Amino acid sequence: MSVAIAQWRGFKAATRLGWEISSNWTQPLIFVIYSVLRPISAAFILVVMYRVISGGAPGTAAYLAFLVSGVAFWSFVQYGFAGLSNGISEDRGEYKMLKYVYTSPAHFYVYLLGRGLAQLASAVASALIVLVVATVALRLPIDPLQVNYPLLLAGSLLALLAVIGMAMAYGLLLLQARDAHGYGELGASVLYVVSGAIFPISVLPGILAAVASLSPLVYWMELIRRSLLGSHAIRMFPALSDADVLLRLLVTTAATLILAHLVFGWADRLARRKGLIDMESNW
Amino acid sequence: MSHPSAIRIFLKTIAARAYPRFVAAYRNRAWLVTETLLPLIGTIAMIYVYRALHAPLRYLGFVVLGGVLLAFWQNVIWAMATQFFWDRGAGNLELFAMAPTSLTAILLGMALGGAYVSLTRAVTILLVASLLFGVGYSLSGLLSALGVFVLTISALYCLGMLLASLFLFYQREAWQLADAMQEPIYFLSGFYFPLRSLGALVGGAGSVIPLALGLDAIRQLVLPGTPQFIPLAWEVLAIVAQIAGYALLSQISLRYLERRAREDARLILRST
């Protein structure tokens, strides 16, 4: 059996495993309801906050679309980052199978990529439903026939790679902890603040804004809004063209993946040396 | 041999169940970080949303006070409502059921310890967020606000006791259900905006959660200019009624569901 087939089988098994772990407790409809309840409520919170301040003044749809699109696509980070980084700790502590994954023929990266992609289905469903509900209810200027799909897909693919890379590195770092409950969500919430998902990064203090501008998520959010809303989009980087933003996303994603690989390698060596792969943890 | 009285056992159970929470408030540093930082970062994110909208300063105060009570809600969900679920997974629930005491006393101990843990986190959130963003409060209403706060937390933990008994019936979906009781509750309770903004119908529905009315009352007392949902006195009365109502309901529910759980062998069912 060739190496490629072994890796493909490992990837398929990991994807299926990730999907089963996240969804096998219920029926598909209930699963979808639970998956969209949080992002829809988060979007409504922002809508009410905005309405309280704007007082329902005309011309508010563009800013509402800014908020809603950020929240809708944040599901990818919530599921991909928090879900995957928590998953590594769960595989060790709850299911006690991390050591078997290490010893299986599939590369650990391939396994984690599959585990991470399993979360994608939930994120896609969640983002779609939030966008559709909000567009209809709030009359947002999103026209499905006018969406720049190639830009949206290219941006989202790069961002997903960055998110999974970050989650892998962060998840391996969490193996150092005996009790990592809530740390996946904590990491995701830090990214939430510096990603431009719900407010432009220009409102952050100087140093935080500078850090945020190094994150691929900021450029991804910008591309999402430009591709969904076209000329109606409120821009965080008005001086940059679409191609410039895409280029920045590409560069920051590449840098993130390199950094994530280095951190992952270091954390992996440390975990092996300290015997953390099969450590009993607080479950 | 003399037996301790029932009331002594009841009180000792409360103290015994609260003790590990008092100790864990500082001993488990991993939880100290997440329990403080998760609500704090969420609060900061919402403050920046208002800042981007150039909102008046009192709106930042709305968010900070929401963040303070959010720490308590997270504790109620993850350390009260779901606690019997975790205890069952760890094998403790069957020991609780066999012990010569009541589950009510155990829940009261959890509530007492949990409220203390949350208070330490909430004070940190209040101080850090207020100092960081220059949020001020009216001192004239502070004492009354503290009174309303105590009533709100009492009602909240009574609701937590009710939820704990309901969660006895959940298996693997308990985690998802607890997860789903976050943003939807933040929305319905007006954590980040005046409750009045939700309108009478949605705001009224949200008032089932004690946080909604409690938060609105506290805001009215320490943040002058807060749009009033219902008059303050009515809010306080409603919270007092919720304390009595949820306490009573939790007892009925606990007895019924404990009996059902024994019949269905759910007290020993491992699901994690």
Image (cartoon, coloured by chain):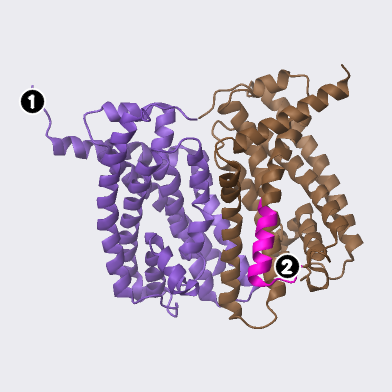
Chain colours: A brown, B purple
Query: Picture quarter containing residue B103?
Result: top left
The residue pinned by badge 2 equals A202
Q: Secondary structure at mark 2?
A: helix
Callout 1 and callout 2 share a chain: no
Residue A147 percent across, percent down from the top left: 82, 63
Residue A17 percent across, percent down from the top left: 67, 30
| Residue B115 seen from this side | yes
Quadrant showing the N terminus of chain B: top left
Residue found 79% across the figure and 35% down from its top: A262
Q: Amino acid under label 1?
A: Ser
Check if residue B111 falls in the magenta segment: no
3D distance between C-alphas at marks 1 and 2: 71 Å
Residue found 62% across the figure and 66% down from its top: B48
Numbered disc in front, either 1 or 2:
1
Q: In the figure, is residue B252 to the left or right of B134?
A: left
Magenta stretch? A126-142
Q: Amino acid under label 2?
A: Ser
Pointer 1 indicates a residue of which chain?
Answer: B
